[in-house]
């Protein structure tokens, strides 16, 4: 349902946290499926938790 790709894997400047098609994140006809993550601070961790809860339908 979700995945994390560390920046070091592909020598990128940021990591990514994304969702596959099973995630329930639909918003109209267009919505993000991955998010760039520069660092996981408290705000980012909270946002990730919210997105995961929404993706699983909680």
Image (cartoon, rainbow, N blue to C red):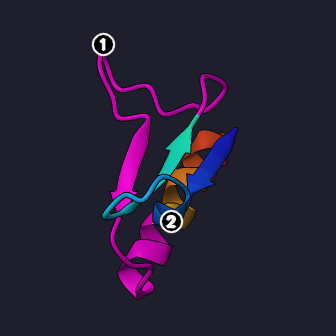
Q: Looking at the rendering, which quadrant does residue 37 occupy?
A: bottom left
Overall secondary structure of the magenta section: loop
Residue at 61 percent across and 32 percent down: it is: 23
Residue drawn where x is 46% and y is 63% of the image:
7
Quickly name the residue at label 2.
8
Q: Nearer the viewer, residue 4 or 44?
A: 4
x, y percent for residue 39: 38, 78
Residue 9 lies in what quarter of the image? bottom right
Furthest-top residue in view?
A: 29
Say whether residue 37 is magenta.
yes
Residue 29 is marked as: 1
Give coordinates of residue 43: x percent, y percent. Answer: 37, 80
Crowding at label 1, few (<14), some or many (≥20) Cα neighbours within 10 Å?
A: few
Please provide percent x and percent y for residue 54: 56, 46
Nearest-to-viewer mark from 1 and 2: 2
* Residue at x 50%, y 65% (from the top left corner): 8
Quarter of the image where the N terminus is located: top right
Q: Is 29 within the magenta?
A: yes
Name which of mark 1 and mark 2 comes first in the sequence.
2
| Mark 1 and mark 2 residues within 8 Å of each other at the beta carbon | no
Which is nearer the eye, 56 or 17?
Answer: 17
Q: Which residues are magenta?
A: 20-47
| Classed neighbour count for the residue bearing mark 2: other residues with Cα under 10 Å, few (<14), some (14–19), many (≥20) | few
In the depicted structure, whether residue 15 falls above or below residue 35? below
Q: Residue at x 56, y 38 (%)?
A: 19
The local secondary structure at tag 2 comes to helix
């Amino acid at each position: 349902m979700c995945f994390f790709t560390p920046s070091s894997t592909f020598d990128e400047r940021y990591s990514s946290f994304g969702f596959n098609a099973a995630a329930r994140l639909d918003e109209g006809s267009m919505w993000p499926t991955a998010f760039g993550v520069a660092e996981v601070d408290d705000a980012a961790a909270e946002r990730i938790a919210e997105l995961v809860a929404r993706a699983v339908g909680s």
